Image (spheres, helix red, strand yellow):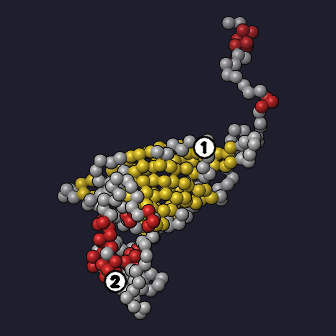
Amino acid sequence: MTESNFSRFKNLDAYAKTLDDFRVKTSTGAVVVDSGLNEKMSINFNITFPRVPCDVLTLDVMDVAGAHQSDVLHSIYKVRLAQDGTEIKRERTQELGDSGPDLKAFDENYCGSCYGAVKPPGGCCNTCDHVREAYELSNWSFNHAENIEQCVREGYLEKLKEQDDQGCRLWGELTINKVAGNIHVAPGRSFQHGATHVHDIRRYLSQGLNFSHHITHLSFGEKTPMTHNPLDDRAVTMKEDGLYMFQYYLKVVGTRYHFLDRIPISTNQYSVTQFIKDLQYKDALGEIQASNGLPGM
């Protein structure tokens, strides 16, 4: 091949180029820096757990900026479900964490015992939830409700047993920092032990739970018909109870839609990778133990 032919071959371009008239040049080229890290972002979700009672579930949020939202109560709701998936007493739909009407003490001077635990702000443990709160402040596990006068009076164990065959639908909206973080739905009450986030799951270690779930909807930011949400209508079914951790790793990318006839819309898209981890194993004595990790999602 002569030099002139080689030069012509080098100039051959098999990939079409955009005309200069349609190009928009920026100082950073194809890279755009997201300067809105101090902004907030909303998460919209609707998730059903057909084999986990509502009273068992807690939802917590943590991020790399150090913000923690434990046992989130606001703008998130739970609906009790029968075995066939129908709602139970829709009029009693409650905010997540709401234990229903507070039972009054027998008289105005009544001050319930906290059983040696750190007393809550009110100074008295007049309800079963007050005792549970005191135990959490003391970093104690709450395992013997049958010996707690307030819990016996309120029928705490009977209510739990009544819900054994029920499911739960969680839905609502979270507002979080626009940084990397972790959102999990798990059994047991959550609390902080020093710098560690802890769930009290001792009562579930021997029997386990069936965390089969159906994600009806999960999106970040404003809902738009143009955005595809990969986890919408995603179902995972487990044939038996156990201690499983369902992990969804999401990468969220800010997206802005520009229209000719209306104002732009800022929202988000995401990709997802899914993992399932069995947390149970048998020790040398044949007893079932749990490895590191939190069952749930």
The residue that appears at 41% across and 93% down in the rendered structure is 109
Relative height, residue 142 to residue 31 (above, below): below
Q: Amino acid at mark 2?
A: Tyr
Crowd rating for badge 1 (residues with CA inside 10 Å; few <14, some 14–19, many 20+): few
The answer to which of marks 1 and 2 sits earlier in the sequence is: 2
Q: Amino acid at mark 1?
A: Pro
Location of residue 82 (image quadrant): bottom left
According to the image, label 1 marks what residue?
A: 225
267 on left or right of 208: right
The residue that appears at 45% across and 81% down in the rendered structure is 120
Element marked by disc 1? loop
Residue 238 x/y as whole percent: 33, 48
190 on left or right of 239: right
Residue 296 x/y as whole percent: 39, 56
Crowd rating for badge 2 (residues with CA inside 10 Å; few <14, some 14–19, many 20+): few
Location of residue 27 (image quadrant): top right
Element marked by disc 2? loop
Relative height, residue 175 to residue 15 (above, below): below
71 on left or right of 252: left
Relative height, residue 189 to residue 294 (above, below): below
Marks counted in the figure total 2
Can residue 295 be seen in this snapshot?
no
